[in-house]
Image: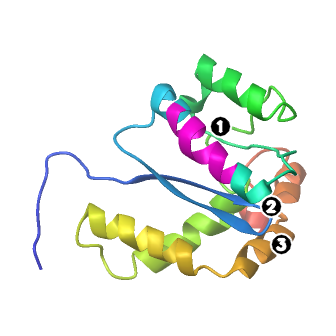
Amino acid sequence: MYEAHTQNQQKVNVRAGILNEAIIRPFFIEGNLKADNYLIMLQNEIVPAIRNIARQNFNIWFQQDGTSHYGLRVRQYLNEVFPYRGKEEGPVRSPDLNPLDYFLRRYLKGKIYNIKPRNLNDLRQRIINEFRIMPREFCRNVILSFYNLAHCQTAEGRQFEYLL
């Protein structure tokens, strides 16, 4: 084993999505996610990947969270591409309110960190590999079993993990 120590925490910033029964591949962000590089990623990678899956049926509700997503140019672009998404975003940094948070992230972490990754490249490759082998029925089952939003409503937006 080769162990390296750095002064700064090493990390991999990943974005992914679920559309119908399909996983939208992982997108890796180099450095910190800021509005400018997020806009470029949306234009060049994310939206084309969504269009490829959706084909002609592009009436899609695009959900996201995080403060870097609220740059003016990002919002203008998203309003052009997804005109029916509404002007209000979902709760910022709100855990467990979408299948990516309550299922996919936990599932992937369990698989990927089963054995400690050797380095960042190994971590990236493990993420890619897990996305490739994930069965399509996972997405269908996850979406069909999505009851957390009802729990959130029952708790009037307060903590609701005890209801699960």
The dot on residue 148 is 2
In primary-sequence order, the first of circles 2 and 1 is: 1
Q: Which image quarter holds the C terminus?
A: bottom right
Cα distance between the residues tagged 2 and 1: 16 Å
Mark 1 neighbour class, 10 Å CA radius: few under 14, some 14 to 19, many 20 or more: few
In primary-sequence order, the first of circles 1 and 3 is: 1
Mark 3 neighbour class, 10 Å CA radius: few under 14, some 14 to 19, many 20 or more: few
Magenta-highlighted stretch: main secondary structure? helix
The dot on residue 54 is none
Q: Which residue is mark 3?
A: 145
Mark 2 neighbour class, 10 Å CA radius: few under 14, some 14 to 19, many 20 or more: some
* Residue at 11 percent of width and 58 percent of height: 5
Q: Which residue is mark 1?
A: 92
Q: Which residues are magenta?
A: 40-50
Q: Nearer the viewer, mark 3 or mark 2?
A: 3
Left or right: 32 with respect to 36? Answer: left
Describe the element under mark 1 as helix, strand or loop.
Answer: loop
- The amino acid beneath tag 3 is Ser
Q: Quadrant of residue 74?
A: top right
Residue 60 in the magenta stretch? The answer is no
Q: Which x, y percent locates residue 78?
A: 71, 30
